[in-house]
Image (spheres, grey):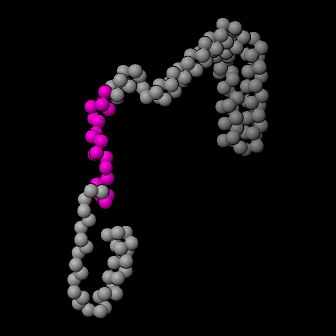
Amino acid sequence: MIAETVCSAVSAAGLGIAAVTAYRKRFLTAARVAAYSLVPIGLVMTGVVEWLADTAFSPVAWAGFGVLGVAWVLFMTTRAVERRRGGTRKERKEARAAAQRDAVAPGASAPSLGTGSRPAAAPPAKPAKASRGGDDDFSDIEAILKKHGI
């Protein structure tokens, strides 16, 4: 009862402010203020305010919100644990079986470009120099290749 009275008073005050704003020739702002001021009375007329008032002062409703909160916390906790473990029990079992099937031989992970058991190839013979000017161009490239061991 008091909520409906307060909403009606807020709507009346808002419509008064809209009238003053329209008198000052600010019609767009006046229309916007009038729209906002009609919302509380519309909520009263639809019964939303009465429903909210009944819900706000009902201990059963607050207990229901508490139960919903506990359910949400449990749901989020189980999701976090599931993500940390890697899914459901069935998914973990399938992943373990797939890992055993796709196992790789121990020697397969040795680097293929290392200086392991393969003998190093002899460096290629240098071609005869054609001119003195061409040697300067390739000396920088040779230095870079030697630096990288190529």
Judge from the rendering whether residue 1 lies leftward or rightward of residue 137; answer left or right.
Answer: right
- In the rendered image, residue 75, in percent from the top left (x then y), is placed at 53, 20
The answer to whether residue 46 is visible is no
Q: Which quarter of the picture shows residue 145?
A: bottom left
Task: Give the residue drawn at x 22%, y 78%.
Answer: 125
Judge from the rendering whether residue 85 lies leftward or rightward of residue 140; answer left or right.
Answer: right
Task: Give the residue drawn at x 33%, y 85%.
Answer: 137
Q: Is residue 19 above or below residue 61?
A: below
Q: Which quarter of the picture shows residue 89?
A: top left
Q: Is residue 90 above or below residue 130?
A: above
Task: Give the residue drawn at x 28%, y 45%.
Answer: 107
Quarter placement of the N terminus: top right
- In the rendered image, residue 54, in percent from the top left (x then y), is placed at 68, 10
The answer to whether residue 59 is visible is yes
- In the rendered image, residue 84, in percent from the top left (x then y), is placed at 49, 29
Question: Between 60 and 103, which is closer to the camera in this rendering?
Answer: 103
Task: Give the residue drawn at x 71%, y 43%.
Answer: 26
Quarter placement of the C terminus: bottom left
- Provide the residue span drawn in magenta: 97-115
Was residue 122 drawn as part of the magenta stretch in this picture? no
Q: Is residue 10 above or below residue 148?
A: above
